Amino acid sequence: MKTSGNATLKIVPATDADQQIEVLIDENDGRVALRYSTWTDGLGWCAQKTIWLDGAQLDHLHRALTVARVRLRCASKEEKAVPAEIIHLPIIDHSRIRA
């Protein structure tokens, strides 16, 4: 969707069906926006908050989101990990073994 020099790159649905995050690019000045919207019966999608980012901010946000995603995945794996069972083996005294 394109409006006033802005083009929607992606609409990310939220967990709730009545919320979404829209990623926009302003082709005139090269900035990117994140727009949080909610659905209102009778009105449709209503923008609640729009955050404009320049290239440097977008790079920093991308790195921060990547770190957050990795940490969440690691935390999820740790929760699912089953502790290993320790098997106690007999101790062999090699000094008593004759060759």
Image (cartoon, grey):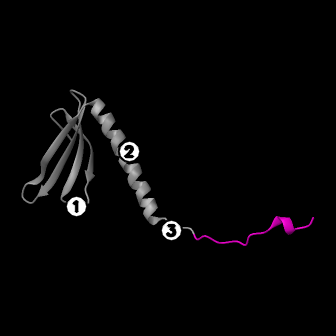
* Place of residue 81 in the rendered image (x, y in percent of width and height, measured from the top left): 49, 65
Q: Which residues are magenta?
A: 85-99
Q: Which mark is residue 82?
A: 3
Q: Residue at x 30, y 39 (%)?
A: 61
Quadrant for residue 43, please give it: bottom left
Q: Residues within 10 Å of mark 2 (few under 14, many from 20)?
A: few
**Earlier residue among tags 2 and 3:** 2
Could you say whether the residue bearing mark 2 is in a helix, strand or loop? helix
Q: CA distance from mark 2 to mark 1?
A: 23 Å
Q: Residues within 10 Å of mark 3 (few under 14, many from 20)?
A: few
Residue type highlighted by circle 2: Thr
Q: Which residue is denoted by mark 1 in the rendering? A: 16
Q: Residues within 10 Å of mark 1 (few under 14, many from 20)?
A: few
* Place of residue 64 in the rendered image (x, y in percent of width and height, measured from the top left): 34, 42
User: Mainly helix, strand or loop, the magenta region?
Assistant: loop
Residue type highlighted by circle 1: Asp
Could you say whether the residue bearing mark 1 is in a helix, strand or loop? loop
What is the quadrant of the N terminus in the image? top left
Could you say whether the residue bearing mark 3 is in a helix, strand or loop? loop
Q: Which residue is denoted by mark 2 in the rendering? A: 66
